[in-house]
Amino acid sequence: MKFRVVVGGEGEGEEMRVIEAPSRFVVYEQIQKEGRTVLQIKEKSSFALPPWLTMSIGSGVKKRAIVTMAKNLSAMLSAGLSLSRALSVIERQSPSKRLKTISAGLGEAVKRGSSLHDALSAYPAVFSGLFVAMAKAGEESGTLANALSVVGLQMERSEELRRKIKGAMIYPSIVVTAIVIVGILMLVYVVPTLTKTFTELGVAVPLTTQLIVAASNFMVANALFVLTGLVFLILGGAIFFRSRTGSALVLWSALRLPVIGELVRETYTARAARTLSSLLSSGVPVLEALGITREVVRAGSFARVIEEAQARVKKGEPLSAAFMEHPKLYPLLMSDMLAVGEETGKLAEMLKQIAEFYEGDVAEKTKDLSTVIEPVLMLLIGAVVGVFAVSMIAPIYSLSSAI
């Protein structure tokens, strides 16, 4: 990484430098060795991207790599290795160049006396608030190895759930994409030939055929415009649906769909329960845990319920009260089990059971999702093919009847 640094010193003027180093901690150490002081430091990038575009760009480190890092750190700390040495091992064995750089920066920070959670917080795009909070709780309680193991498990379960849902949506996505591509090819290559035949024979065509012919003529006459528009539509749609407004619209629509709505509710319930359970079992205070869980859940309406729960707990009300008032988002089972957990003093354990129950339920439902979606897709394909076939065959049939 490159940093733009303003340095100064007693009796010396300010100087601006560009320094390449694995982390800002290395920059501080280098400047201090020169007997000077860092007045300002900022990470330098080769070019700046607008916010609407950068929101779709990740941290450069796969979540799977972070999960492996957490588990390996936990194992090495449990085996008696020091934190700085464990980070050095992570740096050497990591296949990712970006993660090597980050591990080196973490190691340098720890050697300088920084706590792990402070070092992690310097990379917010890589390490989530959950990861940092769990590390902090582990350091304060002397159970860092266990805390890292828990956060590794939590991230692994969350990623596994996401992969299963994503995998279940691959089949319908491929089918819909194939329908669109075949439809475009038919409009560009097949319809013009039939249209020429109808025109030459003076056949009267129905309204549906006229609409298909009009669409075909427009696409053939404005191929470049249509192609450019399609590219912009796909990119614009991807950016919009990643934005807060687009995500809220998708969530609102998904919750009102049969089968899909239930799957969405259970997915967010499992994520919230798993995160909250991990934080509470590691000793993170309830209010702080709720704040981090809200950031992990993120989805508008689901996150607002957690925010409401946080405000009500601050006033002394039970945690289950807020969830109980939103059964359309969080199932009643969750609020009932939360209430039992609060009464018995086993809240973290109850949350873990809730997470495991809904994770298992979502896993089973995603297996059957393709079976549910398949008939709908068949009906869609039948409708598209039927409309096209009738529209194109009807004029030919009327011509043959006239003969």
Image (cartoon, rainbow, N blue to C red):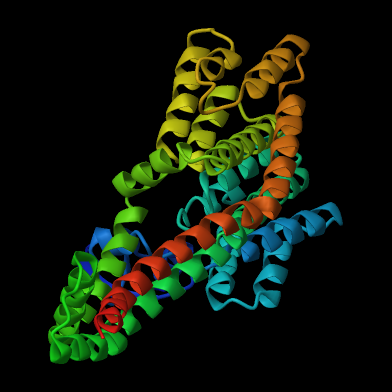
Q: Nearer the viewer, residue 25 or 215?
A: 215
- What residue lies at 35% left-to-right and 76% top-to-bottom? 183
Is 350 above or below relative to 63? above
Q: Is residue 175 visible?
A: yes
Q: Nearer the viewer, residue 367 or 343?
A: 367
Q: Quadrant of the C terminus?
A: bottom left
196 lies left or right of 3: left
311 lies left or right of 9: right
Question: Where residue 74 sits in the image (x, y, percent)?
Answer: 76, 54
Is 196 above or below relative to 311? below
- What residue lies at 25% left-to-right and 73% top-to-bottom? 230
- What residue lies at 25% left-to-right and 67% top-to-bottom? 233
- What residue lies at 67% left-to-right and 19% top-to-bottom? 338
Q: Is residue 8 visible?
A: no
Residue furthest to the front: 403
Quadrant hosting residue 301: top left
Question: Where residue 85 sits in the image (x, y, percent)?
Answer: 73, 64
109 lies left or right of 357: left
